[in-house]
Image (cartoon, grey):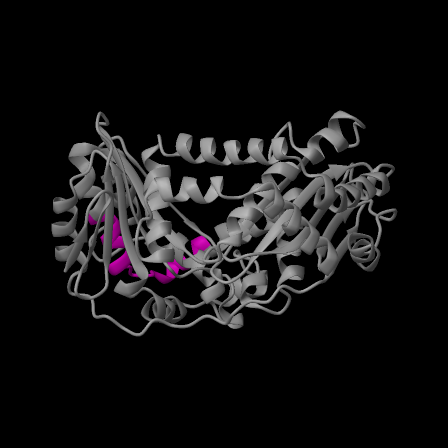
Amino acid sequence: MTTSPDPQLTTLPNGFRIVSEAMPGLKSAAVGIWVQAGGRHERIEQNGIAHFLEHMAFKGTQKRSTLQIAEAIEDVGGYINAYTSREVTAYYARVLESDVALAVDVIADILRNPVFDPNEIEVERGVILQEIGQALDTPDDVVFDWLQEQAFDGQALGRTILGPTERVRSFARDDFFRFVEAHYNPQNMVLAAAGAVDHAALVKLAEALFGDMQARPRGAVDPAEFTCGEARMIKPLEQVHFALALPGHGYLDDAVYTGQVYATAMGGGMSSRLFQEVREKRGLCYSIFAQAGSWEETGMLTLYAGTSATEIAELTDITLSELRRSAADMSSEEVARARAQMKSGLLMGLESPSARAERLARLVGIWGRVPPLDETLARIDAVTTGDVKAYAGQLCSEGRAAAALYGPAEAAPRLDEIRERLAA
């Protein structure tokens, strides 16, 4: 067993990791287990099972009923929840200092002792089908699923996390046990906590609750490759929902920081280039933004705007012009402002124990360590205006893009025209 200080990281002999950071002055803590098993770890016939499994975790164990799971945490004034992403499923709680051990015990119970009762499976199947229906009825949600699919066509990274209706309808009890057996092994788990926590006590809890798990080989995932496709659904809505994706970098690539600075400068706030040019100067939309997302070996720069049928052509034209122009005239003031936004967002987020615990888990999952905060800030500060211009120039010159449009989008340019204008 090895332990590192500030934040403290301990690895049990079976590969299970515990990371924590005390936050003096707090009387509460955020604690959870992050499992490196998300949507991209599913085979095509399993699409949606990681998310379904997350729901089933709260539907009863060998020790606690569904109600008892909720009562165990809420009786002490805490809350418990979970989420599924493309690379991770997280189960977490927020409790008072005196109830940290209880929270860890409950989370361990739902992960290690699920019963997957057939009746509860049917109940939750109905809940998830309703969730899928709600997402399909929300244009500014579904357009991002379509964009992801077009950016990583035919790949696990491109599939929706909720899964298609036909798959969700078909999952049986044994499917859940098989997915757990394949992916919920100790090397894929990180117990993370922040706030009023004692690391030594957490390690003892982990040893008691997870130390007997047998290490197993970690399953590999297929590497993802950015593809260029378009999804377009013409529908008589009030707005066209327009989403554009350009290839980005994985979180292990140093260039990921340049991509994040660029996305922030282009559409990260009210002072950003797209917000000023498209909304403030021309009034073409209410909402427009850019963001950079990363996974292990790849990433994606996403731009989104919602506008009317009569404005979509002009909005698209200005957006593409600004993307091209940024390679030549991105200013040092814009880059400095973007760096400051990124750093302040990071530092302000660390004032929340929940955000801090999630960051700890994510960093350990990515690098197997928690890089010092100063190291991360220095990487952001190291991004120069020249780096950002070169990054923008490469994005445009390659002309690689994916797009998704939903609504009265007849006047919007087709993807081949978008790509040509980017590379012009």
Q: In the rendered view, would you say 103 is above or below 401?
A: above
Image point (50%, 61%), residue name: 48
Q: Which residues are magenta?
A: 105-124
Q: Is residue 361 magenta?
A: no
Percent across and percent down for residue 119 are: 38, 58
Q: Is residue 122 magenta?
A: yes
| 120 is higher (above) or lower (below) than 373 | below
Q: Position of residue 128 (x, y in %)?
A: 50, 52
Q: As displayed, is residue 230 above or below residue 71? A: below
- The picture places residue 296, in percent across and down from the top left corner, at 47, 60
Left or right? Give the position of 196 relative to 348.
left
Does the magenta stretch mainly form a helix, a strand or a loop? Answer: helix
Nearest the viewer among 136 and 318 is: 318
Q: Residue at x 84, y 37 (%)?
A: 311
Residue 283 position by quadrant: top right
Percent x, y for residue 70? 29, 41
Instruction: Decide which of 214, 49 is in the foreground and name it.
Output: 214
Taking the spot 72% from the left edge, 29% from the top edge, the residue there is 276
Quarter of the image for the N terminus: give it. bottom left
Q: Is residue 417 left or right of residue 345?
A: right
| Residue 329 in view of the camera | yes
